[in-house]
Amino acid sequence: MPKTESGNAPFSYDGLDRVIHEKARLGLMTSLMAHPKGLSFADLKQLCGLTDGNLSRHLQVLQEAGLVDVIKGYEGNRPHTSCRLTKAGRRRFLDYLAVLERLVRDAAKAAGKEDARSVRLGILPT
Amino acid sequence: MPKTESGNAPFSYDGLDRVIHEKARLGLMTSLMAHPKGLSFADLKQLCGLTDGNLSRHLQVLQEAGLVDVIKGYEGNRPHTSCRLTKAGRRRFLDYLAVLERLVRDAAKAAGKEDARSVRLGILPT
């Protein structure tokens, strides 16, 4: 935003990386964060409620962005695909989450200002 | 997800309404939540760091979904467009935020499990 001073667009949330922000990929990143040793294609599919096609497509986007490693191998005679966060993926996801946290705080504060009873968000210190 | 029991896809985050989740619209919803009396087109543009074209396009999506009212009028002789959340918009945004909060918690918990020092999210009770 060249025409405005920094800080003049407090609701632009520039740090919400679009590669991560997409809903299905956000679920993938979160489940991989919860399983640092990696997850099989089949497990990811179930945990995130995705079809084969959607899972492949979104994993490819994450892989091309350097956020996820996809390791193709065998378990016995059967092909077995395993996925895990890269170091950079983990770091970028933490950065993303910090922005998301700010957004939730902003919104909760805004909601509380208008009508405290409506705030069902319980994460903020009272 | 007809083939799995409810709860079998804990990372699907079905409640992340795509109309709201898009990054620019998320900023618009948050800034309108913070200004319940409404904001002018010019103010929204600045607060969210959007161009005229992007702002119009995203406001139209929010308006068609019934989340935002766009009121066209005059201030003196000059056209003046004002925007505010509808009641339904406010309610749906709060629902959305509850899911987002769960996601941030899940991810923060996952990050903490692997390496507590990496967690820079400060919203969770310790």
Image (spheres, coloured by chain):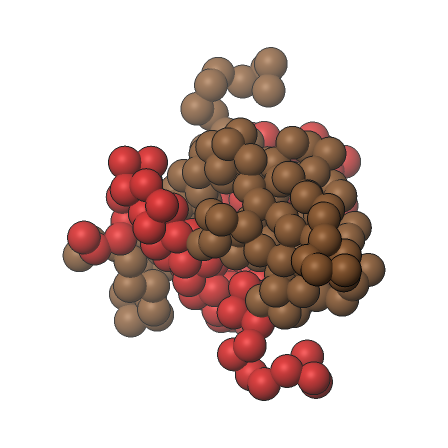
Chain colours: A brown, B red
Q: Residue, x 47% and y 64% (percent of image)?
A: B99
Q: Is residue A25 visible?
A: no
At which x and y percent is residue B107? 42, 52
Q: Residue furthest front?
A: A76
Q: Position of residue A101 (x, y in %)?
A: 39, 46
For image coordinates 32% across by 41% down, the residue present is B115
Q: How many marks?
A: 0
Q: Quadrant of the C terminus of chain A?
A: bottom left
In the current view of this chain or complex, which residue is farthest to the right? Answer: A53
Left or right of B43 in this view: B51: right
Query: Does residue B73 appear left or right of residue A123 in this picture?
Result: right
Q: Position of residue A100 (x, y in %)?
A: 45, 45
Where's the N terminus of chain A, which quadrant? top right
Q: Residue at x 61, y 64 (%)?
A: A43
- The quadrant holding residue A41 is bottom right
Location of residue B99 with respect to A103 vertically, above or below: below
Question: Which residue lies at the image location 58% right of the left edge and 85% below the top edge?
Answer: B5
Q: Quadrant of residue B1?
A: bottom right
- The reply to whether residue A9 is in sight is yes
Q: Which residue is nearer to you in this view: B99 or A109?
A: B99
- Note whether B17 is above or below A65 in the view shown: below
The x, y position of residue B73, in whole percent, is: 66, 49
Pick the front one: A121 or B42: A121
Nearest to the observer: residue B51 or residue A19: A19
